[in-house]
Image (cartoon, grey):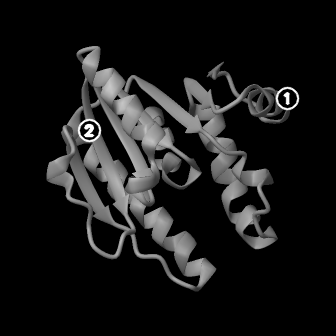
Amino acid sequence: MKIVFIFAGLLQYKGRLLKQIRTLQEAGHECILIHGQVEESPPHYADFPFQTVPIRLVRHSNKVRNTLHHLQFNLAALDALPGLAPDVVVCVELFGALSGAVARARGITQRFVFDSNELFMQMGMQPLKKMAWAPIHAYVFRKADVILHAEQHRMEYCQRHYRSRAQHFL
């Protein structure tokens, strides 16, 4: 099975993501990472035992521009997906999840997994940013086949507050 992960952010701090990829590879699955690269200098992708598709994601002090850059990253990741022909798309965190939700809606992938390791909408997000991301968050939850949670209380909260037909797992 071919599994494509989508993540926007600092790769060096994503031990859980790297462990998920390693575990799946050990089980015989092909894993690819579309990385929204925000580091000042790109990571040494050749050091990773999986294919990476880096997409530069510029962070800006202007929050509106940052949101637009994240949306551009999602569009670029979505454009890359058909050529990768994934069976499953796993989006890590909200800022890269729109691409997976749209890929699922368009039939580019058979399954969409949203790794919702944080309660983004409840973690002190500024009102304007929350207003921009709330419809995307709702869409992602509706389109997900599986939602992964970091702990029990977060899972229960999401099941109570967000509409989703997805299977929820810790």
The amino acid type found where label 2 is placed reads Ile
Say what secondary structure mark 2 lies in.
strand
Q: Quadrant of the C terminus?
A: top right
**Structural distance between the alpha carbons of marks 2 and 1:** 33 Å
60 or 76, which lies in front?
Answer: 60
Say what secondary structure mark 1 lies in.
helix
Q: Position of residue 127 (x, y in %)?
A: 81, 69
Image position of 154 (left or right of 140): right
Q: Residue furthest left?
A: 46
Q: Position of residue 21 (x, y in %)?
A: 34, 31
**Classed neighbour count for the residue bearing mark 1: other residues with Cα under 10 Å, few (<14), some (14–19), many (≥20):** few
| Disc 1 target residue | 160
Q: Position of residue 118 (x, y in %)?
A: 67, 45
Which numbered circle lies on residue 32? 2
Q: Quadrant of the N terminus?
A: top left
Image position of 168 (left or right of 36): right
**Classed neighbour count for the residue bearing mark 2: other residues with Cα under 10 Å, few (<14), some (14–19), many (≥20):** many
- Is residue 6 visible to us here? yes
Q: Position of residue 158 (x, y in %)?
A: 77, 33
Please report whichever mark, 2 or 1, sits nearer to the chain's N-terminal start. 2
Residue drawn at 48 percent across, 52 percent down: 96
